[in-house]
Image (spheres, grey):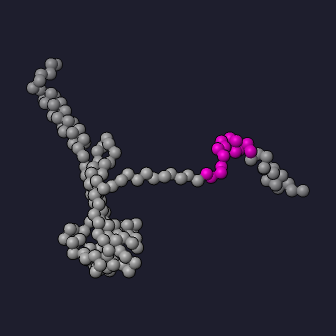
Amino acid sequence: MVIGQNSPIWQRLRLGLAALAVCGAAGCAATFNNHGYIPPEEELTAIVPGVDTRESLETSIGTPGAAGVMRDEAWFYTDYRVRNFIYRAPQITERNIIAVSFDDEGVVQNIERFGLEDGQVVRLSRRVTDGGIEEVTLLRQILQNFGRIDVASILGADN
């Protein structure tokens, strides 16, 4: 049986290859995830340093989304956008940080905005505590325990 180029088998094969090519191209496309929250600009411009307090900010723009960004001296509102590819590590493409600093009485002192271009790479130090345990193989541990076993007490033959 000779299969021509206009046969139904060739048409299905071409359609299948075209669908495979479209799926492959779609798999290479980036996906974006947005995280965090920054209050709108009009709400930020309504904050008056020296007048507004923590309590007034809670009612007007709300508290930061995570407790880790609320400290006595400042609140940090953050948002960022991450680009993900299937074949590459995620990459932060956009980041905004709003820092609202307070004095000792909880009155707003300053509002600062930082972007991705203001960021610095922070190198984390890795501190490992020595457990004091030597590397002992399982076989060595088993053999060391043989001298500690009192067979008489196990068999109930106490004198």
- Residue drawn at the location 70% of the way across and 45% of the way down: 141
The quadrant of the image that shows the N terminus is top left
In terms of image quadrants, where is residue 78?
bottom left
The residue nearer to you, when weighing 98 against 84, is: 98
Farthest residue in the right direction?
A: 159
Tell me residue 48's x, y (percent).
25, 77
User: Can the viewer see residue 16?
Assistant: no
The residue nearer to you, when weighing 152 against 80, is: 80
The stretch of residues the image draws in magenta is: 130-144
- Residue drawn at the location 24% of the way across and 46% of the way down: 30
Give the answer, above or below, for where 3 lies relative to 102.
Answer: above
- Residue drawn at the location 37% of the way across and 67% of the way down: 69
In terms of image quadrants, where is residue 42?
bottom left
- Residue drawn at the location 70% of the way across and 41% of the way down: 140
As drawn, is 148 to the left or to the right of 44? right
In terms of image quadrants, where is residue 136?
top right
The residue nearer to you, when weighing 76 against 4, is: 76
The count of marks equals: 0
User: Can the viewer see residue 149?
Assistant: yes
Q: Is residue 17 magenta?
A: no
As drawn, is 15 to the left or to the right of 65? left
Tell me residue 102's x, y (percent).
35, 74
The quadrant of the image that shows the C terminus is bottom right
